Amino acid sequence: MKTINALTLLLPLFIFQGAKAQSQVYGGTGIRYSVGIETGLATGYLAKKYEAPLGVSVQAEFPITESILYATVNTGFNNIFVSANYSRLVDDLQLVPVKAGLKYFYRSNLYLQSEIGFSVLLNKTNCVEGKKAVFVYAPQAGMIFYLHNNNYIDAGLRYESNGKFYHCDHTNNFVGFRIAWGFSL
C-alpha cells in the first residue's frame, strides 16, 4: 500500500515537471541505452501468494523518428518475492523477460511505451506440469530527467502481465516502477 501511495504522489510531479522541462534539449543522437532497477507490487491473483518484484534491466532504444519514436529492446531479471504465509509452500518467482516495443515521446521528456515478448521462468517446479516461457506485455508511461551531455534519468511506471506458467495457475501481473540511468554514445 505504501508503494501505491508513493507512486500516486509522484504522478503529479511527473506532469508538472513535464510542462516545466519542455524547453530542455537532449544532447544525444542515435541509439540510446539504459540500465535500471525495478520494483513494484503484485496485483490480482499473483498478490494472493506474492508481494513485490525486485529486479534489474537493460534497454536499448533505436531511433525511428529522432527524439519522437524509438524501437526498444529490453531484458533483465525479476525476482517476485513470496509472501510469508506461503514461503513453505512455494518459491519466489524468478523471471527473465525479453521484450521489444515502441517508445513514443509526446513531449520532449514525457513518453508512452508498449512492449511485448516472453518471460522465462528460471525456477520451474518439476512436479507441476506447465510452461517454461510465456507471453508478456507491458504498457508504460514515464519521464526523462535530462542531465548534462548525453546522460539522463528515465523513470517509468508500467503494468506487466505474464501468461500462465502452470495449467492450474492464473496470469502473473504486477505494477512496476523502473528508474534507470540512460546515455547515448
Image: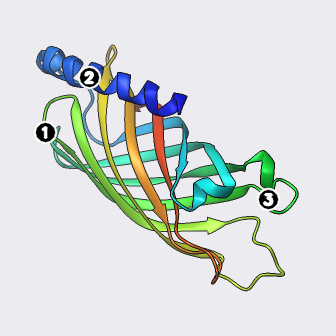
* Residue depicted at x 63% and y 56%: 48
Residue 162, relative to residue 16: is it above or below? below
Q: Residue at position x 53%, y 28% from top?
A: 2
> Which numbered dot is residue 69?
none
The numbered mark, 2 or 3, whose residue comes first in the sequence reads 2
Q: Identify whether 63 is placed above or below 44.
A: above
| Contact (Cβ within 8 Å) of mark 1 with mark 2 | no
Label 1 CA crowd tier, 10 Å (few <14, some 14–19, many 20+): few
Alpha carbon separation for disc pair 3 and 1: 41 Å
List x then y, in percent, for residue 172. Answer: 55, 63
- In this picture, is 174 found above or below 124? above
Mark identifier at residue 106: 1
Give the number of the mark in front: 3 or 1: 3
Q: Amino acid at mark 2?
A: Pro
SS at mark 3 in the image = loop
Q: Nearer the viewer, residue 147 or 19?
A: 19
Residue 21 image-quadrant placement: top left
* Mark identifier at residue 91: 3
Amino acid type of disc 3? Asp
Residue appearing at x 48%, y 43% in the figure: 176
Q: The disc labelled 1 sits on which kind of residue?
A: Tyr
Q: Is residue 15 visible?
A: yes
Q: Which residue is mark 2?
A: 12
Q: Residue at x 53, y 33 (%)?
A: 1
Position of residue 165 measured from the top left corner of the image (x, y, whole percent): 62, 75
Camera-side residue: 73 or 174? 174
